[in-house]
Image (cartoon, rainbow, N blue to C red):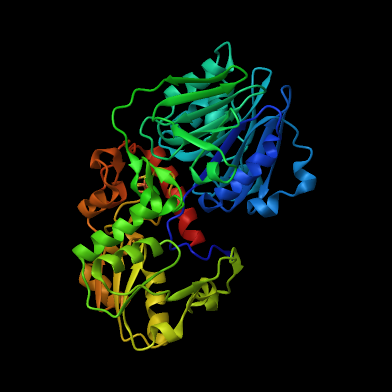
Amino acid sequence: MVNKISKEKLNEKCGVFGVYAPGKSAAKIIFYGLQALQHRGQESAGIAVSDGENILVFKDLGLVSRVFNEQNIAPLQGQIGIGHTRYSASGMNIWKNSQPLYHMFKNESFAIANNGNLTNTNEIRNKLIEKGVKFETNTDTEVIASLIGSSEKDNIEDAIKETVSKIKGCYSILILTKDKIFGIRDPHGFRPLVLGSLDGNYVIASETCALDIIDAKFIREIDPGEIIILDKDGIRSQMVLPVDKISMCIFELIYFARPDSYIYGKNMFAVRYRLGQELAKECPADADIVISVPDSGTPAAIGYSKESKIPYAEGFIKNRYVGRTFIQPEQKTRDISVKLKLNPLRDIIYGKRLVVVDDSIVRGTTSKKIVKMLYDVGARGVHLRITCPPLLYPCYYGVDMARRDEFIANHKTLEDIREFLKVDSLGYLSIDGLVKAVGESKEKFCFACFNGEYPVPVPDNQEFSKHLINKEKRISSNA
Ligand code: SF4
């Protein structure tokens, strides 16, 4: 049986990257950009390029470095293109669901790549099916592509604008036509999307770390509700969607975005360091050393150490090369999935009282195994500290989470969770502490998985419930 070994973690859906680079090989630039965005999705990778007349797409399941090689990049001739790395939060992990998707508008081809999740997918999909549109995948991205493809507008630019006025939810989209790239960010700005310059030309990427790898310069974030159009005349920007409330996903700052990326002008490592500092203020502990659950807990553990004056130490060695694995049912009850990734440093841990910093607790099963591993190598005490509030509500905006009843904090008190994990103390950072550490107005973020205040209403109709139940079933069958 093939299992995702870290289902306990929250998983981001996708990374997107596009470049308009006359005189250069777009595919090679995109290949490096996608490598920098690999953390946003490891299940498939794809590149679409245009030579000015035709669009060519190559994609497959797997990591960027496994999907692409010199032989299959060479035929991707073209100076403009887009790329995608995928984590399958909606739609199964099969080849035809990988992106970019190739589609037609009248007799013009285009390719599309998206990071997000729509909240009105079923409504649009059903209307299109009634009109005779056939679907090959069960992705939101095909729904967007089909809306564009079935538009009666005269040109693709107007068809795209009409489409984004109809879709709701979370999306950061790149669209490649034979001579243009469109970059579109939803009016709430759930997912990041940034604009950069490369030798006088333009790049669009999910995160700034993808600009750094190709020596592109950061220009600015693409605004919520904005469309950027890149073509031979340069760059055009239009605000096409009304913005009533920006709601960037706070988990981008807590965990998803790479620590060397910048959001709202703030470096993610520095933000997470401050999360650790706030956590030390809110939840102090009497301990000998601070360690992290690597890698995501590390900047916050260093911040916790600085604030608490308890020395920081590396407590685990992480195996960064573990992807999918084959776990036998009888192994599920053992610690194999966690041990494949993390091994505690016995000499550091033995006889010590530890503060252990992690970014979140979903079901609690992984945290429990991690704590047990620490006791097994002689820890004298464990104080677990989490850099966000308890997770209580599922995400409908593209983050693969457990069902509501699977979140441990939904059916256990803080004391019950502490007992379940067998730790001496357990502390979560508050929403106020989170906001203080981030240093931006609370109004700019989505905190729905903590407080249930969904910025884009989740429709309460039967069809949507069915869609969610199916999604939840699929998630639990993977777990
Ligand atoms: S519900 Fe949570 S994970 Fe989803 S967008 Fe909002 S903050 Fe992010």
Q: Residue 107 appears in which quarter of the rendering?
A: top right
Q: Is residue 428 above or below residue 125?
A: below
**What x and y, as percent, mark residue 392?**
29, 55
Label tally: 0
Whether residue 384 is visible, yes or no, is yes
Q: In which quadrant of the rendered image does the N terminus lie?
A: bottom right
Q: Residue 100 appears in which quarter of the rendering?
A: top right
**What x and y, as percent, mark residue 179?**
65, 21
**What x and y, as percent, mark residue 422?**
30, 79
In the depicted view, which residue is nearer to us: 119 or 225? Answer: 225
**Left or right: residue 456 compared with residue 479:** left
Whether residue 1 is visible, yes or no, is no
In the depicted view, which residue is nearer to us: 149 or 320? Answer: 320
In the depicted view, which residue is nearer to us: 294 or 417? Answer: 294
For image coordinates 26% across by 74% down, the residue present is 418
**What x and y, as percent, mark residue 448?**
29, 46
